[in-house]
Image (tube, rainbow, N blue to C red):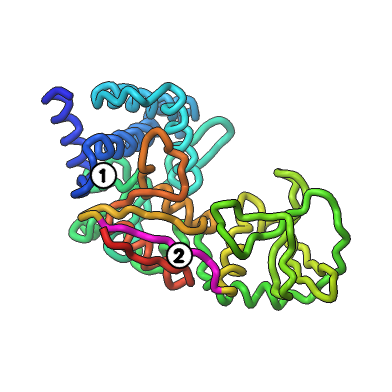
Amino acid sequence: MTDRFTKIFNEIASSLNITRGVSESSPDWIGRIIYSAAGRSALYSLYDHLEDEESVSITHFKARARRELVALCSAGNLTSITEEVIQDICDEVYNEYVNTGYVYHLPNRIEPAPEKAVLWGHVSFVRGMTFDNRAKSSGIGYYLLPSEKNNNNSNVEASLSEFYKMFHISRVKLDDYYQKLVDRKSWQLFHAVDNIEYLRTSGSFSRGYWNSSPDKDGNISLLRVGLQGERIYYLYRYENNHIYVSVLPDWMTNNYEYRQIATCLLSHRDVLPDSAIRVDKNIVQLNIGYLYPPSIQNVIMLYSWPKSLNNVKTVFNRVMTRPVWESIRSAIEPLGYKIREELS
């Protein structure tokens, strides 16, 4: 890479506060810079609309991200980044911004969300402040550092409840959520049908979260029937050689919302896998033991980088700026999720 391109990457990294880990390779650091730059370019595109419009097309949004990716991957000599990989990155950037409220979705178009900042932990989490040169980036999410949070910013709200509200995270602890589930009174005898899957509650979760055999220990668990897109979820318990079920409403299970139920059931049995972190100076390597409910997982995905641009959709292994991670951690641990720190 030429001195000119090295200077460009250093300038982007400085502007977004993307520091290199002690043990991090130069290509990995460059990959993180490129990923964040693509997100920033996509957000800039939201203001390319005509004066009498307030939105841009999804195609335009992704095209701006793609243009940045192509230019920077070429400058960084990342020859392994194919056109397919670039498309995956553009799709991922779009999905994460939609999933976390950074953009509002209209038919075939999107527009930026209003400005908002919530102070929690070590940073202020912000959206709608794309052109604020104080805003730093972790992944493709934006934040302000403590010394900057109150500087000409009257929209900052400081509390854990505001953080939960900003990202639509349930404030109900896993133990309390479990109690609400077991208080359900309507149980019916279950008649076997095709395409039944039972929540895996033991063994290796790397083999998948579902298996073909029910738990027969009498504990309440989760099953689902039907094919993808048409599944119905039930709580179930095994008693006297029969399965009894209580059907769950769609809003509790669609779009991976069932993970809120799954995590509380596993936590109650004390088998919910921990997530592990490894600190490398100003960044954190995160290894998620069991996927979080969508609202939490989406925040993590927004504010983190994939370990490699070639596998941008990976959800278990991520990299995050340390103060951002510490703030997110201090919000999810009180809910009952366990996190352990490994030695570097």
| Rendered location of residue 67, percent (x, y) | 35, 23
| Rendered location of residue 129, percent (x, y) | 32, 45
Residue at 70 percent across and 74 percent down: it is: 219
Q: Is residue 277 left or right of residue 6?
A: right
Residue type at the position of mark 1: Asp
Magenta residues?
Answer: 270-279
As drawn, the residue found furthest toward the front would be 203
Q: Tell me the CA gap for discs 2 and 1.
A: 36 Å
| Quadrant in which residue 181 is drawn | bottom right
Residue at 43 percent across and 45 percent down: it is: 102
Residue type at the position of mark 2: Asp
On screen, residue 230 above or below 11: below
On screen, residue 186 above or below 252: below
Residue at 38 percent across and 30 percent down: it is: 45
- Let me know if residue 278 is in the magenta part: yes
Q: Earlier in the sequence, mark 2 or mark 1?
A: 1
Q: Is residue 268 left or right of residue 229?
A: left
**Residue 307 in view, yes or no:** yes
User: Quadrant of the image for the C terminus?
Assistant: bottom left
For disc 2, the marked residue is 274
For disc 1, the marked residue is 132
